[in-house]
Amino acid sequence: MIKIAVDNLVKNKVRSILSMLGIIIGVASIIVLVAVVDGMFFEIQAALSEFQGITVIEDGALGPPFSRIDASYENDLKKMPYVKSVVPSGAGLPRTIDGEPVAFELPVIRLIGSDYSKKTFSTAGGIGGELIEGKELDASDRKKVLIGVDLKDKLNKFVGNTINIDGEKFKIIGIYETASSFFNSSILMSLDDLKDLKGISANKVPQFTILLTDVDKTEEVVKLINFKFEGKLKAYSSQSFGESIGGFLDILRLMVVAIALVAAVVAGIGILNTMLMSVLERFQEIGTLKAVGWSGTDVMSLILIESAFLGVIGSLTGVFLALFLGIVVIQGQFGLTVYYNPVIIVGAFLFGITISIIAGVYPAKVASQLNPIEALRIEWVFFNEKTCGDNYLNNFKQWIFMANRIVFDSKILGGKPIIKGTRISVEFVLELISSGMSVEEISEEYSQLKKEDILAAVGYAAKALKHEEVLLIGQ
């Protein structure tokens, strides 16, 4: 049964491949999209772990790059309970680096400015990190920067080199590294330099970074600031920010899974169409199988096995495609982090197989309910040398190839009848024909066989198949 199923799929290679293509795309989409979202989640978690203290920006601003706070709020924030220090800081995006426009790509290149008279590098701009080359910035450093290790590799820069940012030259005095690639492509500088680059007035700052005497009081202080400065300032901690981002990513994960599932269901419809067309085109074969003893369950199992094969091969290919796209393309070429969850991979694989089998149920049911007598009468080719002309032998071989496969897989000739006057069996003659030999070639090869003997052997096979109208030869 498995051999027949495989032969049927191989016989219609193009149709089988097109059907599997839908499953491949669906399975690969589920795995890759979820892997990208999960990779973003873990990167953001790592980035948030680098945040220190509380970040305060202008209420209603989309983020620090768009925030403008009156510098006088620094004194008001210092009076809040548990506040150890309030450091003016800010962030922005460069327009050009070394005269080249900065393309939007991940991780984003950021400019992070901080007042180093009130802060050390280890908490610059609200992020933690480690200096791995050069020296730290201090309060008197102007036109000097630290760059992240990833940006160093990308721009091929070293300590002592010059970097041009938005038309202004800065000297690189150090290289730093954090636990998150989100910050390893950033540029640290003094807040005054950042304000000059972004045209921020002297009495404004983009944000404040607040360090506390007791980190356990973080959420309490955040609530106090938001209550006291409602409508003016907005405070958040890494924990609250992480929770909001996590909720957003959960929704995004569900959305991408839903989109991928739709693709997989469409693929299932394609497989249903393929299997149904296969059944309609194989009425003779299915009718013959039932005529020689196959039950409706056997026929149904055959069609479902074919559907399952499409699902297994398509799903397995989709898994490998997802791994290739994620590791080689998305991570290797675009620098995005991908995280493959084994549960998602196994689930997508099984989902692809399940969709394929479900899609094969209806065609299998149609095939199992065929009446063998009616099925055998549908579209049988009547062979006649006078009416079929040059196509006679080709059609003859084509039918015999199919009949031979069914006959000898099913062993219905059993006793292997010998052709009268020879020691050659009908089975042997049919095998010669199914191998591609013509009637004339067989007669020449086996002189004891005449053309009418060969045709008589085929007639016996037709009779054995319990269908009197299969062949009308030499009429």
Image (tube, rainbow, N blue to C red):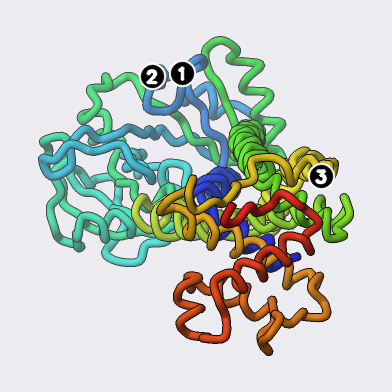
Q: Are marks 1 and 3 in contact (CB under 8 Å)?
A: no
> Are discs 1 and 2 less than 8 Å apart at CB?
yes
316 to 330, vertically: above or below? below
Q: Amino acid at mark 2?
A: Arg
What's under tag 1, amino acid-wise?
Ala
Residue at (76% x, 65% y) in the render: 1
Distance between the Cα atoms at labels 1 and 3?
78 Å
* Element carrying mark 2: loop
Element on which disc 3 rests: helix
* CA distance for labels 1 and 2: 8 Å
User: In the rendered image, which residue does mark 1 sit on?
Assistant: 61
Of badges 1 and 2, nearer the viewer stands 1
- Residue placed most toward the observer, 292 or 242: 292
Residue at x 11%, y 35% (from the top left corner): 167
Q: Position of residue 76 (x, y in %)?
A: 53, 21
Q: Are marks 3 and 2 in contact (CB under 8 Å)?
A: no
In the rendering, at what x and y percent does residue 243 appear?
66, 36
Tell me the number on the disc at residue 373.
Answer: 3
Q: Left or right: where does residue 79 sit relative to residue 441?
A: right
Q: Is residue 335 visible?
A: yes
Residue displayed at 27% across by 34% down: 194
**Of the pair 215 and 355, the residue shown nearer to us:** 355
Vertical comparison of 46 with 105: above or below: below
Kind of residue at badge 3:
Ile
- Displayed quadrant of residue 82: top right
x, y (%) of residue 353?
70, 52
User: How crowded is the residue under tag 2: few (<14 C-alpha within 10 Å), some, or many (20+)?
Assistant: some
Q: Find the distance from the CA under tag 3 to the CA under tag 2.
A: 85 Å
Q: Residue 123, how many percent across, how many down?
A: 46, 49
Q: Which residue was labeled with disc 2?
A: 68
Which tag, 1 or 2, sits closer to the chain's start?
1
Q: Is residue 282 above or below residue 403?
A: above
